[in-house]
Image (tube, coloured by chain):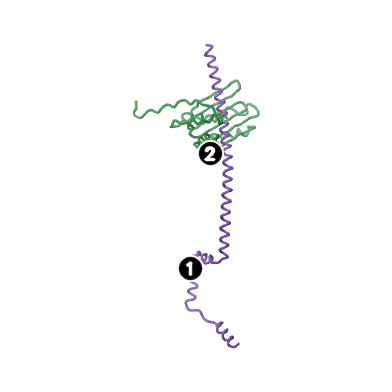
Chain colours: A purple, B green
Amino acid sequence: MKDFEQELKRALRRWDPPDSFRERVLARVAAEQQQPWRRAVSLRQRPMLRWVAVAAIVVFGAGKLSYRAHEHRLEEASGRAAKQQVMLALRITGNKLRVAQKRVKSVEGEDRKVGKTL
Amino acid sequence: MPVNLDRLAAKASETTEVTLNQRTLQLAARFMNDEDDLEARELVKKLKGIYVRSFEFDKPGEYSQADVEEVRAQLKSPIWEKIVRVHSKRDGENAEVYFKADSTKQIGGLVVIAADPRELTIVHIDGPLDPSDIDKLGGDFGVPRIEVPPQPKPAKEGAR
């Protein structure tokens, strides 16, 4: 039992870190602040975070697909509405041109009648 | 539309307003895939805009000649050429057709002003129009054949 206590004491005894330890820690903190991606790289190695990242990508991808489908539906609705407007405009134009043509023809017809009587 | 016709819209009992710019026309053309639409699609793809303002009034005389004159004032030679003007004293119907002169043999645009005592319609089609396009569309949209006077050939350089 005493041996065990001795061993424990030895293991838990206080010892000073090497002289360069403080400098190395400070240098690493400074380097991480300058290059935050390094931390991201290290986080990637954690499996839980890996799954979170995968889930985020899936959700983002699904969202993007859904948005595209919505955009497509919206564009199709706008396109069909625009087509209806084009058809309406062309129909009105046709009708009004027909009025003009009818008048021109009736004037021509009257002229011909006058010509015959003369 | 060259003039603001909101004033007339306020007086009218029914207003039809169509405003289609080039972007909207291009979008519409992408959805004109039926067999009947193909010729119209080719026309629409070339156009810069289609603008229609049609006003129906409950009583005759709710719009004035000054209102129509405001539109006419924008359609001056040499840019615009009046091709047809018909006026009926009997029923007060007026119709005017203007073509926009183009440096090429094509028509650069078309304006139709149709007025009767209870209705005023102004149509502006902006963009190159081939007379044969109008001719082809006659069947589908009731656009009649319009006799387009032959354009004078430009004199050759150096020719006397």
- Of the pair A74 and B107, the residue shown nearer to us: A74
Q: Which residue is mark 2?
A: B29
Q: Position of residue B64 (x, y in %)?
A: 59, 28
Q: Quadrant of residue A103?
A: top right
Horizontally, is B92 left or right of A30 in the view?
right
B67 in relation to A5, above or below: above
Chain letter of mark 2 equals B
* Residue A112: image location, x then y, percent: 53, 16
Q: Is residue A108 above or below residue A48?
A: above
Q: Residue at position x 44%, y 30% from top?
A: B105
Local packing at callout 1 (Cα closer than 10 Å; few below 14, some 14-19, many 20+) is few
- Relative depth, front residue between A41 and B39: B39
The N terminus of chain A lies in quadrant: bottom right
- Residue B160 x, y percent position in the rendering: 34, 25
Q: Which mark is residue A49?
A: none
On residue A31, the disc is: 1
Residue type, mark 2 in image: Ala
The residue tagged with tag 2: helix, strand or loop? helix
The x, y position of residue B155, in whole percent, is 38, 28
- Whether residues under marks 1 and 2 lie with C-beta atoms below 8 angstroms apart, the answer is no
At 57% across and 46% down in the image, what residue appears? Answer: A72
In the image, residue A65 above or below residue B117: below
